[in-house]
Amino acid sequence: MGPESKQPEVACQSNLGSQITTGGGFSTAFPQPSYQSVAVKGYLTTAPNLPPISNFNATGRAYPDLSSLGNNFEIIVGGSYYGVSGTSAATPVICAMITLINGDREVNGKKPLGFLNPILYSLNPAVYNVPSPLILSLYHFISSG
């Protein structure tokens, strides 16, 4: 499933052979934080195939803020190979990336990143409006699945 098998990338779906499914959307319990407003406005303006806005809470907190590959990771435990999927696979990947970034910052006399969400949304507001070829190469939007 996906680019590794020369197929278009789609979110994990059980009907396509995945052990897990994925989700995202807008909270009905938590309000949208201010750092998400530009991104959400851009998404709602440009995303293809959205359901009618009356079908979801466009003013709620959008989730996820960050995602990672999370399907069919091979791990080794006690010399045996296992396949894992889901949050148990994706979360350590993101944590490892942030740990490497923070390690580099420490070596260079900088503070750790801290609370990431506002930082992520402030990186480049252009990504939420009219993405340039550079931005498209950095961010990968999946609109199927």
Image (tube, rainbow, N blue to C red):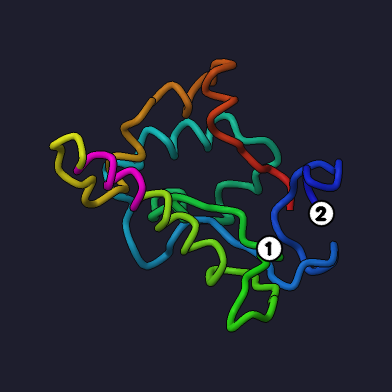
Q: Quadrant of residue 120?
A: top left
Compared with 124, 23 (above or below) is below
Residue 114 picture location, percent across and down: 21, 50
Magenta stretch in the rendered image: 99-106
Residue 37 picture location, percent across and down: 35, 39
Queried whether the magenta region covers residue 81, the answer comes back as no
| SS category of the residue bearing label 2 | loop
Q: What amino acid type should be assigned to the residue bearing mark 2?
A: Met
In the image, taking residue 5 as reference, residue 113 lies left or right, namely: left
In the image, taking residue 78 as reference, residue 16 lies left or right, namely: right
Residue 6 picture location, percent across and down: 86, 41
Instruction: Name the chief secondary structure element in magenta.
Output: helix
Q: Quadrant of the N terminus?
A: bottom right
Depth check, front residue: 11 or 42: 11
- For disc 1, the neighbor class at 10 Å (few under 14, some 14 to 19, many from 20) is many
Q: What amino acid type should be assigned to the residue bearing mark 1?
A: Asn
Q: Work out which residue is located at the far front of the displayed protein and give it.
A: 79
Q: Quadrant of residue 141?
A: top right
Residue 65 picture location, percent across and down: 43, 50
Residue receiving disc 1: 71
Depth check, front residue: 100 or 86: 100
Q: Are marks 1 and 2 in contact (CB under 8 Å)?
A: yes
- Which residue is drawn at the image coordinates 56% and 47% (left, top)? 53
Residue receiving disc 2: 1
- Which residue is drawn at the image coordinates 44% and 21% (left, top)? 126
- For disc 2, the neighbor class at 10 Å (few under 14, some 14 to 19, many from 20) is some
